[in-house]
């Protein structure tokens, strides 16, 4: 991502995303990164101890599994996972999401992802 004075086209940026659970940084906002990803299947249970994480569904349907119940997001809906909350994103069909979180936050928090999705949510 480079600094630009042009609008960011989400459809064009999503078309450039290769693979599921791979995040593409599309913009910066102060110390935050705006990222896009295409997801399908289940990621890993993980937490982000020091930051909240925002998920916005662009297309498809995303379930954020939480230990005390699931949150289901349709296109145009968002959910903020509070810091320290264990969660596991899941999508039955290919789903496009926008993420907002501080720069440098590991996708899987403190969880280890052996041979799993690279750069997930």
Image: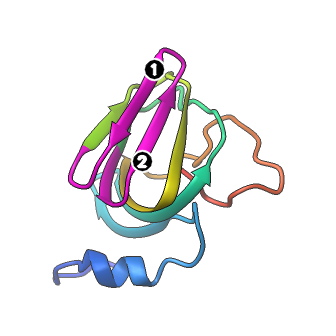
> Is 14 placed left or right of 38 in the picture?
left
Crowding at dot 2, Cα within 10 Å, few <14 / some 14-19 / many 20+, comes out as many
> Is 61 placed left or right of 66 in the picture?
left
Mark 2 element type: strand
Q: Which residue is mark 2?
A: 62
- Which circle's residue, 2 or 1, is located before the other in the chain? 2
**Which percent across, then down, holds residue 33?**
37, 57
Residue at horizontal 67 percent and vertical 61 percent from the top:
118
- The image's colour scheme reads rainbow
Q: Which mark, residue 69? A: 1
Q: Which mark, residue 1? A: none
Stretch of the chain drawn in magenta: 55-77
Q: CA distance from mark 2 to mark 1?
A: 14 Å
Quarter of the picture containing the N terminus is: bottom left
Hey, which residue is sitting farthest right in the picture?
Answer: 114
Hey, which residue is sitting farthest top in the picture?
Answer: 68
Residue at horizontal 53 percent and vertical 26 percent from the top:
49
**Which percent across, then down, holds residue 51?**
43, 32
């Amino acid at each position: 991502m480079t600094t630009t004075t042009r609008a960011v086209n989400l459809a064009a940026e999503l078309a450039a995303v290769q693979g599921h659970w791979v995040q593409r940084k599309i913009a910066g906002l102060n110390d935050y990164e705006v990222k896009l990803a295409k997801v399908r299947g289940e990621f890993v249970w993980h937490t982000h101890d020091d930051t909240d994480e925002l998920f916005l569904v662009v297309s498809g349907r995303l379930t954020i599994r939480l230990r005390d119940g699931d949150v289901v997001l349709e296109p145009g809906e968002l959910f903020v996972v509070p810091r320290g909350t264990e969660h596991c994103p899941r999508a039955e069909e290919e789903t496009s999401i926008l993420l907002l979180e501080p720069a440098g936050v590991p996708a899987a928090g403190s969880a280890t992802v052996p041979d799993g999705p690279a750069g997930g949510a």
